[in-house]
Amino acid sequence: MGTALIYDEEMTKYKLLWVDPACKIEVPERLTVSHGALVRNGLTDRCICLPVREAVDAEILLVHSEEYLEAVKQTPHMTLEDLKEFTLQYGDVYFHPNIYHCAKLAVGSALQLVDSVLMGKVKNGMALVRPPGHHSMRSAANGFCVFNNVAIAAQYAKQKYGVKRILIVDWDIHHGQGVQYCFEDDPSVLYFSWHRYEHQKFWPNLKDSDYDIVGKGEGAGFNINVPWNKVGMENSDYLSVFCHVLLPIAYEFCPDLVLVCAGFDSAIGDLEGEMCATPDIFAHLTYLLMNLAEGKLCAVLEGGYNLTSLAQSVCQTVQTLLGDPLPPLTNLTGPCRSTLESLQCVRAAHRQHWSCLRHAVDLPTFEISTIRIKSSGEENKDEAEVWEEQKSPEEKIWPEPPKRVSPRVCSAVVLPDGVVCPDACERLSSSEDLGPHLLTLKKDFLKDADDSAVTALSRVFSLIDKMKNNEIRNGLALVGDAAMTMTCVVQHVAAEVDSRVFLVCVGNGNIPGHIIEDGKTLVVQISGEDTEEQGSKYYVPVCLKKGCTDTSGFAQAMFSLLLPLGYQHNPSLVLLVRMPGSGVCDIMWQQLTALLQSFAQGHTLVLLQEDDKACVGPTASILLGNPAPPLGQLPASLKEDAEAVERLRSRLQADWNLLLATAPENG
Ligand SMILES: NCCCNCCCCCC(O)(O)C(F)(F)F
Ligand SMILES: [Zn+2]
């Protein structure tokens, strides 16, 4: 199944007709440059382009009041003066004779996208729309928004398809208060938003946007606000919020559909957001959401005002939806202090609502956001602050996101004769010669191994060589001795200068010390064996009381340990080994295999032990880019497991600061 793209140039046919500094950034070119970039990068040809349609009244009334809809209906016939008059009743928004038509198309585009995903015609998609939607409320336009495209899409999905749980992720730099108000008492819609807040000093200046607003009544816990109290946030900040807040809760919630308020004013270069995250971060944010709801993800454009970073971010998002390998994220320096304070506060506010947070170390709730803004007048600001505001933020520059090339072959496999090669995988031909390096290895490691083991190892090595040359994206090998093969592979790869291996070992089995000491190989071992005391900076033994059968403990280790470590290690190869008798369930194994494709541009080598040949099919399915099945709503993990993971994180976070989720006590 493909990726839908919905766009129509009709939605460029309205603009600001008078002087209004607050609205002048919302221009038609936002859509034309975004779509133009997709065309130029050959991405529109790879998508399924769906036609737009106008939303009908009944669909708009899923969220908005009749009186508001009636009022907006009058705008096409208004004179310029009437339009100005009409606009005055709302904030930071403008009307135009054609905006009602475009607003219906924007809603209709979102609904077309939901239809095509939920009817199984496409696997995911993006709608490039204007006017945006997430600020508009039941009876009010606001913040360039007329109808709440994504909120209507959520209600529509519930009503028409009986969707039980919907996750809305709003990565626009502004708080989508319209979405929050629409679902604040609704436990079937989990709304997550991060937004520039600066202790309520930033638009829309609402106390309702703070971290302690968690939803009401039945909806308590289903509204997550992550305030950015400083500008200049980077990729590390965004990733740490995904790893330590959004993903654990989202997996516990287990949505049937994911909607994204895809605003790109949170990217570098945008004068509204003033953040420093680069466009390629959206490739990762999109990917991290694609293993929820079996990949049913609908992204709808919201904001984004720097036409260069907007176009690049849109392309990064669509390329990920199409299944292209993710770009490497370099120099992740870890979250800043302000982010840690926000993380700490949000996790504290939601602890009582989500079991994944229940055992988090005791979290004092910072009073950071109770620093109320002094009375809004200038008189309280010292001249430095006033000057600061008047100084225009300097022109940001950033590198063009790297090209993301899909190798000719996605998945290559090495299987013993008699084991069927899964569809769409390429079996490595047995003609591969025994590389020279092997003969030395044979002496060192394989002296007593039989020829079939040596042959299998030579083929595994050629899988690695093909990944290095980007001839294949990933590989899977069914071998006689997974542990021995693992050791040889690490040895082989570590011998190369700029190689770094991320070894994830599921199940019991000892990891030879010598493969860890050079700092090029980071090992995370998830098992039921208590090997904690042997931990080091590069060897992270996660031991789960009930072993790998415990999905909650396993999932928690995945998000709060494995993801941050993997991002910070930034490997050139991911080696995923399933030890015999690990007890890990297939779905968890598939989720892990999927998640690890965030690293090394998808160059994952999976090693399975021969008697695990039943895992070949399910593993290959994920390596081929199919979404992992849902884990189901996750119960609380065992207290001692959660505490064990927390102890590991606190031991490791000095070396790996993406693990941090609380602000250090000292000043
Ligand atoms: N310096 C100009 C002040 C502008 N204040 C209003 C900002 C509205 C943001 C709208 C948006 O980006 O959130 C949307 F996604 F809805 F388009
Ligand atoms: Zn915005």
Image: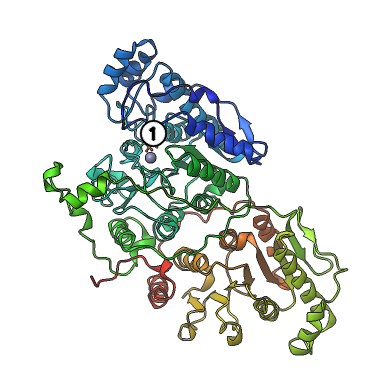
Residue 449 visible in image: no
The correct choice, above or below, for 452 with respect to 316 in the image is below
Position in image of residue 664 (x %, y %): 29, 70
For the image, the number of numbered tags is 1
Give the amino acid at mark 1. Ile
Res 375 → quadrant: top left
* Of 539 and 305, the residue lying toward us: 305
Task: Please state the horizontal and vertical placement of residue 232, each as a whole percent of the image.
Answer: 36, 54
Instruction: Identify residue for label 1.
Output: 25
Q: Nearer the viewer, residue 425 or 10?
A: 10
Q: Residue furthest right?
A: 431
Residue 518 in percent (x, y) is at 57, 82
Instruction: Please tell me how crowded label 1 is: few (under 14), some (14-19), or many (20+) other residues with Cα within 10 Å.
Output: some
Name the residue: 60% across, 46% down.
319
Question: In the figure, residue 215 lies in which quadrant?
Answer: top left
**596 to 453, vertically: above or below:** above
Establish whether ligand 1 lies closer than 8 Å to the Cβ of label 1.
Answer: yes
Q: Quadrant of residue 494?
A: bottom right
- Name the element at disc 1: loop
Quadrant of ligand 1 in image: top left
What colouring does the structure picture have? rainbow
Query: Residue 667, percent across and down?
Result: 23, 70
Q: In the rendered view, does 128 fall on the left or right side of 58? A: right
Rendered view: 379 above or below 512? above
Depth check, front residue: 274 or 474: 274
Query: As rendered, which of 397 and 491 lies closer to the eye?
Result: 397
The quarter of the image holding the N terminus is top right
Res. 568 visible in picture: yes
| Residue located 71% across and 64% down the image | 467
